[in-house]
Amino acid sequence: MRCGIESGGVRKIELLGRRLRKLRKARKWSPAEVAERAGIDEQDVIRIERGEARAGLETVIRLLAAFEVDVEDFERLAAAERDNDPPVERFRRDLSG
């Protein structure tokens, strides 16, 4: 995953981490549970969520699979953030119907 700058100076790596954290908290999972489900190290989950580590494509795919979320749904979460709608709630509504 390339690390770049998005509007407002927020790095893409930080946005990825924020979105993953929102998904995790929406499911009330610990970083350890995400790590176990994704087959990655717990510290990697924590560092990715904090924007301290890059996640390669394979890791992102594993994380999304752990959350049972596809790339399109993950992009909808990003769109919800851009629209200033509470992203987790909008994401839940989108997935449920």
Image (cartoon, rainbow, N blue to C red):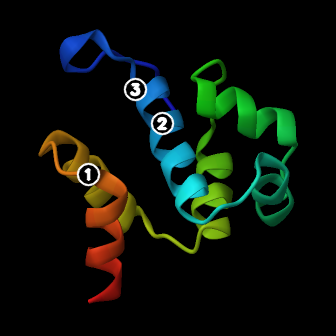
The residue labelled by disc 3 is 12
Q: Are marks 2 and 3 in contact (CB under 8 Å)?
A: no
Seen as rendered, the residue at the extreme bottom is 97
In this view, the residue in front, 41 or 61, is: 41
Q: Which numbered dot is residue 18?
A: 2
Q: Residues within 10 Å of mark 3 (few under 14, many from 20)?
A: some
SS class, disc 3 = helix
Residue 39 on image: x %, y %? 84, 58
8 left or right, relative to 19 = left
Q: Earlier in the sequence, mark 1 or mark 2?
A: 2
> Residue flagged by tag 2: what amino acid is it?
Arg
Seen as rendered, the residue at the extreme left is 83
SS class, disc 1 = loop
Image point (26%, 64%), residue name = 90
SS class, disc 2 = helix
Image point (49%, 49%), residue name = 22
Q: CA distance from mark 1 to mark 2?
A: 13 Å
Q: Are marks 1 and 2 in contact (CB under 8 Å)?
A: no
Q: CA distance from mark 1 to mark 3?
A: 19 Å
> Residue flagged by tag 1: what amino acid is it?
Pro
Mark 2 or mark 3: which is in front?
2
> Residue flagged by tag 3: what amino acid is it?
Lys
Image point (60%, 55%), residue name = 24
Image point (49%, 70%), residue name = 69
9 left or right, relative to 29 = left
The residue labelled by disc 1 is 86
Whether residue 72 is visible: no
